[in-house]
Every structure is written in C-alpha cells, then in structure tokens.
C-alpha cells in the first residue's frame, strides 16, 4: 500500500507544519507531499525546503478574486494528489469548488469552537475573560471555522496572560492535536460519526 | 465576625442547592439564610425545608411583568440581608434594579461560556458536535449568561451521549465549581481582577 499523502497550506511561520514534519513525515506515518502558501515569504516554506518537501509559493495576483486564486491553486496542487489537505495557519476562506475537489480538509483553530471563531482568537478569549480556552481540529467547510469538530483540547488562561503567552500555551496543544488528527486519517481511523454529520476520530495511541 | 449569608434562587429540582447545603451550609463555611423560588413546586424548596433553611415560594401573578415580580421578590428577600445571591437553576433574567440591590449574584451554567448560552446548553453542545463542553460560574448581569466569568471546568462529550447523559456528567462539575465559588466569596477571596472588569477567584484550598 502506498503512503498516505498530505498537502499542507500555510500562510505564516509554520510551527504547526514543523510538528507535522517532525512527528508525521519524518516518522513515516504519512508523506507530506507538498507545502503551499499564498505568502511567498512564509516561514513555513523555509521549513518545508529544509525538510526536502516540495513547496509551492503562489501569491494572489492583483485584482484576482478568492475563487480565481483558488482555482489556480487547485490546478497547481492537483498533480500532487493529496489524500488529505491540512490548513496550518492558512488565512483565507476556501471556496466550495476547492473544498469539493480536495476534501477531506482539516484546520486547527486556537479556541474551543464555537467560541471565538475568526482572527485573533486568543485575544478574543482574553477580552471575554474566560478561564479556559483551547484548540479545535475540525473539517473545513465554506464557513469561518464552522465545520464538523474532530478533536478539542482545553488550555487554562492564567492571570497576567497576554494574547501571545496564551497562544504559546495553546500552540503546544495545537501541535499535539494536529499530529493526532493526521495520524488518525493516515491510519484510516476517521469514521463518519452517527450524528451531526460529525466524525469520530479513533484516538491513535 | 458573623457568618457569611447566602440566598439561593432556584426554579427546579435543586441538585446544585443540595451541593451547597452539604458542602457549604452543613460544614459551616457559610449560612444559607434563604432559598427562594418562582416555582412553588420546585424540588429545591423541599430540599431546603429538609435542611431547616427558610424558604420563600413566590409565584408570579397573572399579568405581572418581570420588573414587577422581581420588585416583589426583592422586598421579600431584603430582610434576610444576603451577602451573596446564588442562582442555582433559576430560569428568569434579573432586572437591573434587582442586580443593583443584591450584587454580587452568581450563576452556574452548563457550558463553557461564551459557547451555548441560554436554554438547553447540553443539547446545543451535542447539536454542534463539540468534543469538550463544561460549566461556568459567572457574575450575573442583565444579559443571558453574559457576566464576568469566575470559574470554568471542561467536561468531555462521549460517543452516544444524550443531552441527559452529558448534563449529568457536567452536573458533577457544576456542584464542585459552585461550592468552590461560594467558599471563595465566604472567605473574602474574590478580588476585583486587573482587567476586563472580571474577577479573580482565589482557589479555596
């Protein structure tokens, strides 16, 4: 049986990508066959190159819409035939057509969804004064962090936290959950759940 | 120094009240000086009578508005001079005037707020397919479960959960957090927090 093929989309520094490189790709759980970015200067691309993973740096063109950009991205990604697409800090909403072509697509978000969707979730959590936040791995649909939830982990908010210190604490769990989710997909352990069109992830060890 | 005086408002069976009777009142941490209900048949009233605690069963009158009802309730409660009012399954929104007269008032809610405010929070959580829910103790303001958060605890959602089985698992933590919060108030350990107009609860023990 050939290796499970994972493509990663990232717009930023790529710390979640690094966790996947170290704990999924290098351990042979699955192959990261491509790291693509809408930001040619994304740190994620450097991390991928360093690990010998093909990269695709595709900046949106002036006046190119979300649909047009993602059609172009889809054409460039298709030859890599990913079994799973992982959003690891990818900052654009995906159009329906892209999702239909590449599903399953998963995302990791730094809050306990449905609380604090969208940008700056740790800052949102601090502004509301919650005592627990966390992170969520979910299937991607056309909404902003609205897809079926696969895994969640709680993280305490501590007195004196800034958005940065809170997010750093959440990041540790993001890495863990993302590795767990990709591992479960690679092992064929993600089954359609009985309700809510959600999925059950069988815990990998 | 005289005992810290707690009044409890409850509309239902009163399992949260029972936790306060067993772990706060009977242990001498604070005195529950009154249990009031808008529902004369509330199980909470029976639990209070059994524990020798004064009860106040005050049903709304036909055509009496929320403001009018709570003015009447406030007049009946005032002679008990509570230092703290606890909503333990009280199903009405409190008007500003009532809150101003009796603050601090705390509530326990069966979700990790701001997720799933309002009625049937465990059913809302199952419908969204979250993997973690929990409970929140918060200061009461005029909104629906919108006040500053004091304590939160996460509770896992398990495969096959119904709203009832999930709520039963959450209830265990509601009892624990509510006892912890009332104990912290009684010991003078709740201090105004440095931000978000929230409060910090110093953990009891």
Image: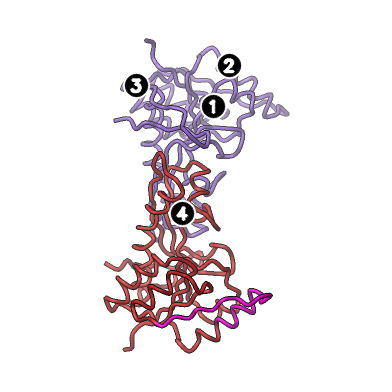
Chain colours: A red, B purple
Specify start and end residues of the magenta stretch as a single range. A54-73
* SS for dot 3: loop
Question: The numbered mark 3 sits on a residue in which chain?
Answer: B
Nearer to me, A170 or B4: A170
Contact (CB < 8 A) between labels 1 and 3? no
* Mark identifier at residue A75: none
Badge nearest the viewer, 1 or 2: 2
Question: Measured from the top left, where is residue A36 in percent x and y?
Answer: 48, 77
Q: Name the element at disc 1.
A: strand
- Mark 1 and mark 3 lie on one chain; the one further toward the N terminus is 3
Q: Give the residue pinned by disc 3.
A: B29
**Comparing labels 2 and 3, the label whose residue is closer to the camera:** 3
- Residue B197 picture location, percent across and down: 52, 33
Q: Position of residue A99 (x, y in %)?
A: 55, 76
The residue identified by callout 4 is A112
Q: Kindly report which numbered mark, 1 or 4, lies closer to the viewer in this rendering.
A: 4
What whole-number distance in Å separates the C-alpha atoms at marks 3 and 4? 34 Å
Q: On the image, which quarter does residue A16 sit in? A: bottom left
């Amino acid at each position: 049986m050939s290796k499970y093929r994972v493509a990663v989309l990232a717009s930023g520094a790529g710390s979640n990508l690094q966790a996947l490189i170290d704990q999924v790709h290098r351990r042979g759980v699955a192959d990261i066959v491509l790291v693509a970015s809408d930001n040619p200067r994304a740190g994620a691309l450097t991390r991928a190159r360093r690990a010998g993973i093909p990269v695709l740096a595709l900046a949106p063109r002036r006046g190119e819409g979300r649909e047009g950009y993602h059609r172009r991205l889809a054409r460039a990604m298709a030859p890599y035939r990913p079994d799973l697409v992982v959003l690891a800090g990818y900052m654009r909403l995906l159009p329906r057509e892209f999702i239909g072509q590449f599903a399953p697509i998963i995302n990791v978000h730094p809050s306990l969804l449905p609380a604090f969707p969208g940008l700056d979730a740790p800052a949102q959590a601090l502004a509301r004064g919650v005592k627990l936040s966390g992170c969520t791995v979910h299937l991607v649909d056309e909404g902003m962090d609205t897809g079926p939830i696969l895994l969640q982990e709680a993280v305490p908010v501590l007195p004196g936290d800034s958005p940065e210190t809170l997010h750093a604490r959440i990041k540790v769990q993001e890495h863990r959950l993302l590795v767990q989710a990709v591992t479960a997909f690679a092992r064929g352990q993600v089954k359609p759940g009985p309700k809510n069109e959600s999925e059950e992830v069988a815990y990998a060890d």
